[in-house]
Image (tube, rainbow, N blue to C red):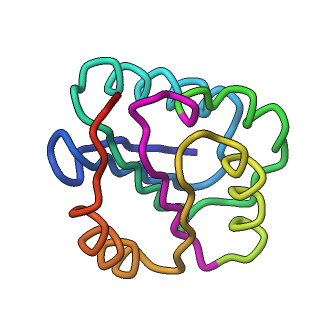
Amino acid sequence: MTHELNWHIPDQVMLLTITGDYTLDAAQAVNQAITEKLSQTKTPLWLIIDATAMSRPYNFQQIRATQMFMDHPKMYMIAIVSSDKLVTLAMMIVFNLGRARLLMFDSVQKANMALQRQMTQRPSVN
């Protein structure tokens, strides 16, 4: 499994690309990286998770327990991109109960279009 976390739009939108299996170790590393970025920002952030090349995860409960960033007050929205119905279901199980708003898309292009529409509604951090 490989994962890559980059700025999609600097200081506004992060892009997490997951390829292969999303292991517990990878989930912990991702959580740490995203939490660090959230602690450094002054504005709410968005996260796009491109799971189009992700294998089907197996440990939903354990992975969910490691993804603490989804409850961070500065995590505004998480957009999941996957065309695989089982990956989409798994990601919904992992991220559905978080504080951040959750959106699901079947392409990065559709996620980007929604992002552009909603950027004007971006809240401030209280």
As for residue 82 lying within the magenta part, the answer is yes
Quarter of the image with the C terminus is top left
Which one is in front, 59 or 93? 93
Q: Where is residue 119 in the image (x, y as percent from the top left)?
A: 24, 62
**123 relative to 103, above or below:** above
The quarter of the picture where residue 22 lies is top right
Q: What stretch is highlighted in magenta?
A: 70-83
In this rendering, the count of numbered labels is: 0
- When asked about the image quadrant of residue 110, the answer is bottom left
Image vertical order of residue 85 relative to residue 42, above or below: below
Q: Where residue 20 sits: x, y (%)?
A: 61, 54
Residue nearest the observer in this picture, 108 or 104 = 104
Left or right: residue 11 versus residue 23 is left
> Along the line of sight, which residue is nearer the eye, 41 or 28?
41
Note whether 50 is above or below 66 in the view shown. Answer: below
> Which residue is farthest left?
10
**x 21%, y 63%: residue:** 120
Q: Which residue is drawn at 24% across and 26% down?
A: 41
From the top left corner, tell me how far across and down residue 36 is, in percent: 36, 19
Report the quarter where the N terminus lies. top right
Determine if the magenta segment contains residue 86.
Answer: no
Q: In which quarter of the image is residue 51?
A: bottom right
For residue 115, side relative to residue 94 (left or right):
left
Judged left or right of residue 85, residue 11 is left
- Residue drawn at x 40%, y 49% is 47
